[in-house]
């Protein structure tokens, strides 16, 4: 995370997007769609801007969105929330930051499953707590009960559960979830869930860990509109927990952003209330994109891992005779006109098993994906 000057450096996503723009490469690095979300959601934001929703809103979020989150949790997962159980945030990122700042002190340990979304390590570092990575390994990248057990100590204060998982596309099994819950109970730790890919699970349905019968106040659940409605730039997220925890986390949020995204909040409420057909067709369309890119990457010579969910495919460049994906990622835009993320950027250097693997985003138009795959075939030459 740190640059040579010892300060936080630009993230791998910022670095690769800058390189893609400089070289004019197709950007399969940073995960953002190249098609905007549903018309009704976009129109609702315009309507809100035109009808006076442009000033600071209520501290916990606008009532329409809080109500829509409550309805959504009941409709999709059968989870019963009250209005006091929800806080709207500036994306899942602020939700994670406010939650970690609310509960972590220097020396506390936070278990994350590795590879991990880079913000977890950075925010944990900002609180002075200690990151304790538990490796997920190929081919299925499921949490291993023994490794988790060994990683937990009396200082374990928090376990971060990101399922569906970025970057592996794994969906944690029910057994794995139950084991995580038992470890959290034994250590009296908080479970923070990051469920931003909840509506992009391809062959089954998402089951939130909050529905597995844990004590309600042990779980802080986080999601966001960016991926579900293809509006990553809006940065509208939300946290669900008990009113006591929501109050503690809101107290921190006040000093991070105070409030955020006034006209986008009612628009996301419209999104969460869209008929099932919207959610079904979106997931089908992303599954098709995943398959187009997977076929293309295999043809280009990569060993591709199956992705059960999310925006990304992991592709090992070892069969191409390439063992350093970080070096490859820096040269690829110039070399073949495609940008991707080296998986090592989302893990510790000790994870040598991830060294030759790239992460490619498939949340792009079908034509872009086909074009990228055919350009990547050039790596064989
Ligand atoms: N968590 C994961 C796993 C992500 O992939 C991302 C990127 N969308 C985020 C959190 C951040 O979400 P947001 O843009 O809503 O802050
Ligand atoms: N979540 C997206 C990804 O994993 C965007 C990350 C970012 O730009 N910070 O690529």
Image (spheres, rainbow, N blue to C red):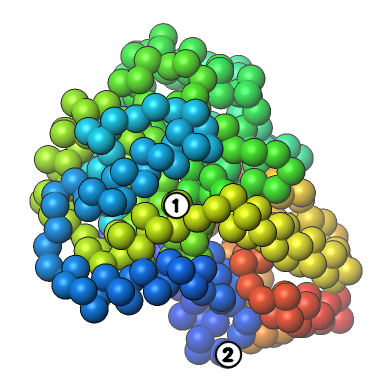
Residue at 52% over, 32% down: 77
Position above or below: 281 against 263: above
For the C terminus, the quadrant is bottom right
Q: CA distance from mark 2 to mark 1?
A: 35 Å
Which is nearer the eye, 362 or 145?
A: 362
| Secondary element at image label 1 | helix
Asked if one can make out residue 321 in the rendered structure from this viewpoint, the answer is no
Direction from residue 310 to residue 255 in the image, left or right: left
Which is nearer the eye, 322 or 308?
A: 308
Residue at 37% over, 43% down: 69
Which is nearer the eye, 70 or 185?
A: 70
Residue at 35% over, 20% down: 216
Asked if one can make out residue 306 in the rendered structure from this viewpoint, the answer is yes
Position above or below: 111 against 148: below
Numbered mark located on residue 24 in the image: 2
Position above or below: 217 against 321: above
Q: Position of residue 136 (x, y in %)?
A: 62, 36
N-terminal of the pair, mark 2 or mark 1, is 2
Q: Position of residue 226 (x, y in %)?
A: 44, 60
Q: Quadrant of residue 50?
A: bottom left
For the N terminus, the quadrant is bottom left
Residue at 48% over, 49% down: 196
Which is nearer the eye, 74 or 353?
A: 74
Q: How many marks?
A: 2
Q: Is mark 2 within 8 Å of ligand 2?
A: no
For label 1, the residue is: 272
* Label 1 environment density (alpha carbons within 10 Å; few <14, some 14–19, many ≥20): many
| Secondary element at image label 2 | loop
**Camera-nearest label, 2 or 1:** 1
Q: Position of residue 113 (x, y in %)?
A: 52, 36
């Amino acid at each position: 995370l740190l640059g040579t000057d010892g300060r936080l450096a630009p993230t791998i996503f910022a670095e690769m997007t800058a390189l893609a723009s400089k070289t004019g490469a197709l950007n399969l690095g940073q995960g953002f769609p190249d098609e905007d979300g549903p018309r009704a959601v976009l129109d609702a934001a315009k309507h809100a801007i035109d009808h006076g929703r442009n000033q600071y809103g209520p501290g916990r979020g606008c009532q329409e969105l809080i109500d829509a989150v409550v309805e959504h949790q009941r409709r999709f997962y059968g989870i019963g929330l009250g209005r006091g159980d929800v806080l709207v945030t500036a994306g899942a990122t602020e939700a994670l930051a406010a939650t970690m700042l609310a509960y972590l002190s220097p020396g506390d340990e936070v278990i994350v499953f590795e590879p991990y979304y880079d913000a977890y390590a950075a925010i944990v570092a900002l609180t002075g707590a200690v990151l304790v990575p538990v490796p997920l390994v190929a081919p299925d990248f499921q949490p291993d009960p023994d490794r988790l057990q060994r990683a937990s100590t009396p200082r374990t204060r928090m376990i971060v559960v990101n399922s569906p998982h970025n970057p592996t596309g794994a969906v944690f099994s029910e057994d794995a979830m139950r084991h995580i819950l038992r470890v959290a109970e034994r250590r009296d730790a908080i479970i923070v869930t990051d469920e931003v890919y909840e509506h992009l699970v391809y062959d089954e349905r998402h089951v939130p860990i909050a529905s597995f019968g844990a004590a309600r106040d042990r779980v802080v659940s986080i999601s966001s509109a960016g991926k579900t409605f293809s509006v990553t730039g809006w940065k509208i997220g939300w946290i669900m927990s008990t009113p006591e925890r929501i109050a503690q986390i809101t107290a921190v949020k006040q000093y991070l952003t105070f409030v955020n995204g006034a006209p986008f909040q009612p628009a996301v409420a419209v999104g969460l209330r869209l008929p099932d057909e919207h959610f079904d067709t979106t997931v089908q369309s992303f599954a098709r994109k995943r398959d187009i890119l997977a076929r293309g990457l295999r043809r280009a010579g990569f060993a591709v891992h199956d992705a059960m969910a999310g925006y990304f495919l992991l592709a090992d460049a070892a069969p191409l005779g390439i063992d350093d994906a970080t070096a490859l990622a820096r040269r690829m835009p110039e070399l073949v006109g495609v940008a991707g993320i080296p998986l090592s950027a989302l893990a510790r250097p000790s994870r040598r098993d991830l060294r030759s693997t790239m992460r490619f985003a498939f949340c792009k138009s079908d034509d872009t994906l086909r074009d990228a795959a055919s350009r990547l075939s050039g790596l064989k030459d």
